[in-house]
Amino acid sequence: MNIQTEHTPNPSSQKFLPGKIVMEKGTADFRNIEEAKRSPLALNLFKIDGVEGVFFGSDFISITKSDNHEWQMLKSSISETIIEYYKSGAAIMLQGEEDNSDTSNTEDSEAVVKIKEILETKVRPAVAKDGGDITFQSFDNGIVYLQMQGSCSGCPSSTATLKAGIENMLKHYIPEVREVRPVT
């Protein structure tokens, strides 16, 4: 097994491509070791000094490092950990612990249905290429609240992505949208 890596727009994050499915459905974002208890692989990755975030996409793993560590020192340890984990055959996530990106439990308004459709078809595939994800949180009084995950979380260009890209697109297609704000 050979792990490919790709740079992301976030200099603190890199995308690791194992050439295998990582998440069958949805995504999983771990910002600390406590959250990582849902995934044995994420726990193993957090044991590497310098790893501050782990994100699982459909076919990639994004790792966020601390500022005082260099990628050249981390890449091989991260790749080895991923390879060994896949060789073990163990599940990536513990049973019943997959993330669900849709956080709403009520019937969606027409505007929310349109927002979710645009996010799913136009936005999420683009941010996945950069090693991250974006999830809908809520729509209230014309304001769309979105959560940036993986490489997109903390990325220097995430504000521009939200404002110039996503906000403009949503305003164009959905007149009720006045603004997009990040949720942390």
Image: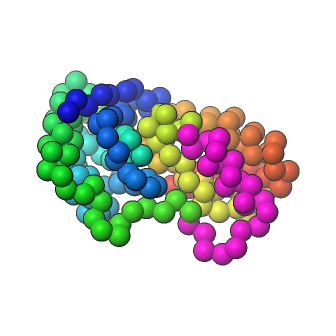
Camera-nearest residue between 40 and 23:
23
Q: Farthest bottom residue?
A: 106
| Coloring applied to the structure | rainbow
Camera-nearest residue between 94 and 64:
94
On the question of residue 160 being in view, the answer is: yes
Quarter holding residue 51: top left
Quarter holding residue 141: bottom right
Residue 176 vertical position relative to residue 68 in the rendered view, above or below: below
Residue ID at (28%, 65%): 94
Q: Farthest right residue?
A: 175
Q: Position of residue 88 (x, y in %)?
A: 14, 50
Q: How many marks?
A: 0
Q: Is residue 143 left or right of residue 83?
A: right
Camera-nearest residue between 183 and 7:
7
Please say whether residue 122 is one of the residues in the magenta stretch: yes
Q: Farthest top residue?
A: 72
Residue ID at (65%, 41%): 122
Q: Position of residue 30 (x, y in %)?
A: 35, 54
Residue 146 vertical position relative to residue 7 in the rendered view, above or below: below
Q: Is residue 177 left or right of residue 50?
A: right
Q: Position of residue 89 (x, y in %)?
A: 18, 52
Q: Position of residue 151 (x, y in %)?
A: 43, 39
On the question of residue 155 being in view, the answer is: no
Q: Main secondary structure of the magenta part?
A: helix
The residue range painted magenta reads: 103-125
Residue 172 vertical position relative to residue 39 in the rendered view, above or below: above
Quadrant in the picture for the N terminus: top left
Residue ID at (68%, 52%): 117
Please say whether residue 114 is one of the residues in the magenta stretch: yes
